[in-house]
Amino acid sequence: MHKMNTVERVKSLLMSYEKLKAVMINSCNFSGIADILLDLDKFINECGFSGRQTGILDLYYLKGYTQTEVANALNITQQGVSFQLSNIDKKIEDNISRQL
């Protein structure tokens, strides 16, 4: 399993997710990148995010929306997005702690 040992590393992989998929498809380098993506998916599933948190995670990290754009898309306040992003970080930290 690829190291998901810091919140920053997990966020970096999340923000690169779509690019990694494109590289994998275009370069036929399936094994290395596919392993990273599968490990990231498994890690994220183990975090136990709520449906709302998963939606925010998808829009903010995977699709690159701003907090304001996420708020508009989900019909919540920007402060609500910020609060949920803090909760997402905490769940990522908790999952890292469980795996150490």
Image (spheres, grey):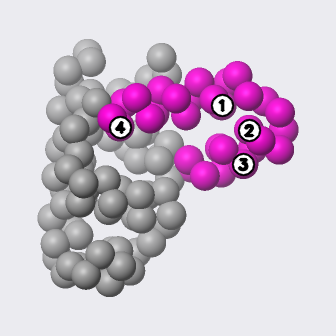
Residue ID for mark 2 = 24
Instruction: Determine the image quadrant of residue 81.
Output: bottom left
Q: Is 95 part of what is drawn in magenta?
A: no
Residue ID for mark 3 = 22
Q: Could you give the CA–CA distance between mark 2 and mark 3, rounded to whole angstroms?
A: 5 Å
The C terminus - image quarter: top left
Residue ID for mark 1 = 33
56 and 92: which is toward the camera:
56
Q: Is 35 part of what is drawn in magenta?
A: yes
Q: Could you give the CA–CA distance between mark 4 and mark 1, rounded to whole angstroms?
A: 16 Å
Instruction: Determine the image quadrant of residue 36.
Output: top right
Given contact means CB atoms under 8 Å apart, are the residues at marks 2 and 4 in contact?
Answer: no
**Residue 96 in sight in this render:** yes
Helix, strand or loop for the magenta stretch, by majority: helix
Local packing at callout 4 (Cα closer than 10 Å; few below 14, some 14-19, many 20+) is some
Q: In terms of secondary structure, where does tag 3 sit?
A: helix
Q: Amino acid at mark 1?
A: Ile
Q: In terms of secondary structure, where does tag 2 sit?
A: helix
Given contact means CB atoms under 8 Å apart, are the residues at marks 1 and 2 in contact?
Answer: yes
Residue ID for mark 4 = 44
Q: In terms of secondary structure, where does tag 1 sit?
A: helix
Residue 52 at x, y = what percent?
23, 60
